[in-house]
Amino acid sequence: MTTSPSETKPAQQSIVVAALYKFTRLDDFEQFQAPLQNACEAAEVYGTILLAHEGINGTVSGTREGVDAVLAHIQQMPGCAELEVKESHADEMPFYRMKVRLKKEIVTMGVADIDPNRSVGIYVDPQDWNDLISDPDVLVIDTRNDYEVGIGTFKGAIDPKTTAFREFPDWFKNQEQLRAEIDGGKKIAMFCTGGIRCEKATAFLKQEGVEDVFHLKGGILKYLENIPREESLWEGDCFVFDQRVSVKHGLELGDYDMCHACRNPIDADDMASEKYVPGVSCPKCFGAHHPSQERRFRDRQKQIDLARERGEAHIGTLPLEKRKKASEG
């Protein structure tokens, strides 16, 4: 099994952050866990990777050489030669430990027999996305969750207001007006952070009988990387599931921090509120926690502050697995 990961940051330098996934049949996916964990630790790469029968999904960070070594290892796994990878950079390590986890799904939808390898929507390159979503006969759906949509989305996109991706199928089935518009000839265009949720969402819609369904290839991250700000139809920041919290055009660091009590993104106005106490509460969760929880949050924040003064990482700041379980890319 896995070994105890180090919590020590690698030397300061430009850190590569790689979001990766691939839907591919891994019948004996458990056998890949230990070798992949060992490869990541040997390369001093940090983050979280999920393995399931349907494939692989994760985000890792490290030096250029370290990330390249891990990607090369993954590409040797069955069906992973054409791994979907989106890269950005950070000045500091966004993760402080490495975990390779075994899951039932690499992105949790909870619907049986959904296989993007068998049936999926039409991929649209970022360069062609503006034309598609500007078409009045196209309905644009943001497949992400409410806290992600809240800080940025494409102009005019439909917000399902889900708190977890597994809610998306029921949301769609209950949209009578939306189904009527589809039956009347409207097309569907969907997007998500990195593309993985859209692959499953379009496969689901195809299973539901929707023929004209499209999705943004490479997700929002690829769009923000390739489309100049002056030509962009994106509004706001894009939430990411690591310590950066959000990114903007050019994948520059965004304007948001995170409330370590409720794990929601917060902006300068939130942090100026009297309801904001670092590590304890923000306007989104003020008064929602039991006093015993608040005491625990205050103690944790003290430890985080002390660790920061010493120039060390603290386990309380670790992002991915302690954020909302809906983290599906």
Image (tube, rainbow, N blue to C red):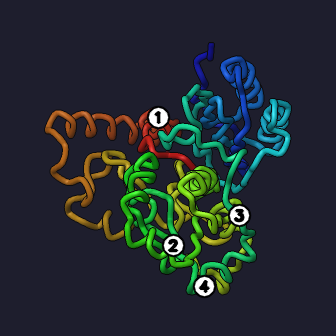
Residue identifier under label 1: 314
Of the two numbered discs 3 and 4 on the same chain, state the one appearing first in sequence.
Answer: 3
**Residue depth check, mark 1 versus mark 3: number of the one nearer the observer:** 3
Disc 3 from disc 4: Cα separation: 17 Å
- The mark nearer the N terminus, 4 or 1, is 4
Q: Which residue is drawn at 61% across and 52% down?
A: 203
**Amino acid type indicated by mark 2:** Asp
- Sort mark 1 into few (<14), some (14-19) or many (20+) by Cα contacts within 10 Å: some
Q: Residues within 10 Å of mark 2 (few under 14, many from 20)?
A: few
User: Residue 191: x, y in percent?
Assistant: 58, 64
Q: Which of 10 and 246 is in front in this view?
A: 246
3D distance between C-alphas at marks 2 and 4: 20 Å
In front: label 2 or label 3: 2
Q: How far separated are the C-alphas under marks 1 and 2?
A: 53 Å
Describe the element under mark 2 as helix, strand or loop.
Answer: helix
**Which residue is located at x 72 percent, y 28 percent?**
26
Question: Identity of the amino acid at label 1?
Answer: His
Please tell me whether mark 3 or mark 4 is closer to you in this view. 3
Residue 98 is situated, as x and y percent measured from the top left of the image, at 61, 30
- Side (left or right) of 27 relative to 205: right
Q: Which mark is residue 122?
A: 3
Q: Is residue 235 visible?
A: no
The structure residue drawn at horizontal position 37% and vertical position 67%, both measured from the top left corner, is: 176
- Whether residue 294 sits left or right of residue 306 in the image: it is left
Element marked by disc 4: loop
